[in-house]
Image: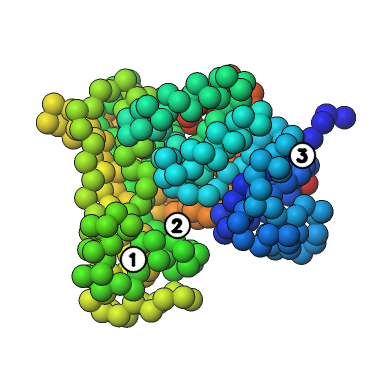
Amino acid sequence: MARKIRVVQFGCGPIGCSIVRLAARKPGFEIVGAIDLVNVGRDLGEVAALHRDIGVKISPNADAVLKETKPDIVLHATGSSLPTIYPQLEQIARAGASVVSSTEELSYPFRKHPELAARIDRLAKENKVAILGTGVNPGFLMDTWPLAMTAVCQDVRHVKVVRIQDASPRRLPFQKKIGAGRTIEEFNKLVAEGTLRHVGLAESIAMIAAGLGWTLDDITETIEPVIAAEEVRSSYITVRPGQAAGVKQVGHGWRKGEEMINLDFQAYIGARESYDAVYITGVPNMEVVIKGGTHGDIATAAMIVNAVPRVLAAPPGLTTMKDLPLVCALPGA
């Protein structure tokens, strides 16, 4: 009988708990540790709503957990900023464990954080582990998926991806993150402070360009509110007419003054239709649509868990979704 993959969960917030619930259903996984600064001492099964204890207590001491449990891999979900979470990656790598992280800036950090990316790559190689940043977006819908669709094209001249989400069923932190219920003045202030934005469009653009062998001159982004024309509400937030229902953020990849890549991300309460779509201008032209869209929280946990075997089989270093063999669903219990 094959040995189970020893897993530690680092970060036990809403996304981390979603990852735990899925990982606990996979027969090839054994959850051996949990790291977080909240819910310390509580059983991970209780915190993650597994409705049973699993004998794993949440600890704030990452070094102690990693040393005691000796995991094969750490499922990491603590933040979006790569410089902020780098010390955590260093702890994990030096403990000899590979990483699959939901940190958006880790998904393709070579353009925005080239020196830090090189340091992570060296760190991983020195400790003979692999490190991957992935999720639903970035990680799949606005980078890996469109790249995969170009496989049937003889020529590609332009890539456009559109993601429209009704944010009503999403978790409260996500609704706050997109500015739902804010006045336009509050929304614009948060944008100016850099605290209201979807993280990952620039990384996805850079990954698509690298995959297609394009050298971009510039990557730009625009952010604006989606303004409610009538009252809309979720279970958590009521948005009045004239307030921001959410965000419209568009990223552009430019080469010689020509737009090569366009990523249009919209998430707001009350969207009448959710969908994900890829439009490729080339030979042939391609238009592929996921009707109803992709549930971000479900898909993020799935990507993190399903990527584990590919990461464990990858050569040591910092890797990306475009470099891995095809990630697919793992069998359940």
Contact, CB < 8 Å: mark 2 with mark 3? no
Q: Position of residue 140 (x, y in %)?
A: 46, 40
Residue at image mark 1: 179
**Secondary structure category for the residue under label 1:** loop
Q: Residue at x 44, y 54 (%)?
A: 293
Residue type of the residue flagged with mark 1: Gly
Taking the image as shown, residue 208 lies to the left or right of residue 226, namely right
Residue 271 visible from this viewpoint: no
Q: Nearer the viewer, residue 135 or 183?
A: 183
Mark 2 Cα shell of 10 Å, populated few (<14), some (14-19), many (≥20)? few
Marks 2/1: CA–CA distance: 22 Å
Residue type of the residue flagged with mark 2: Gly
Q: Earlier in the sequence, mark 2 or mark 3?
A: 3
Q: Image height check: is 218 above or below 37?
A: above
Marks 2/3: CA–CA distance: 44 Å
Disc on res. 68: 3
Residue at image mark 2: 292
Q: Quadrant of residue 49?
A: bottom right
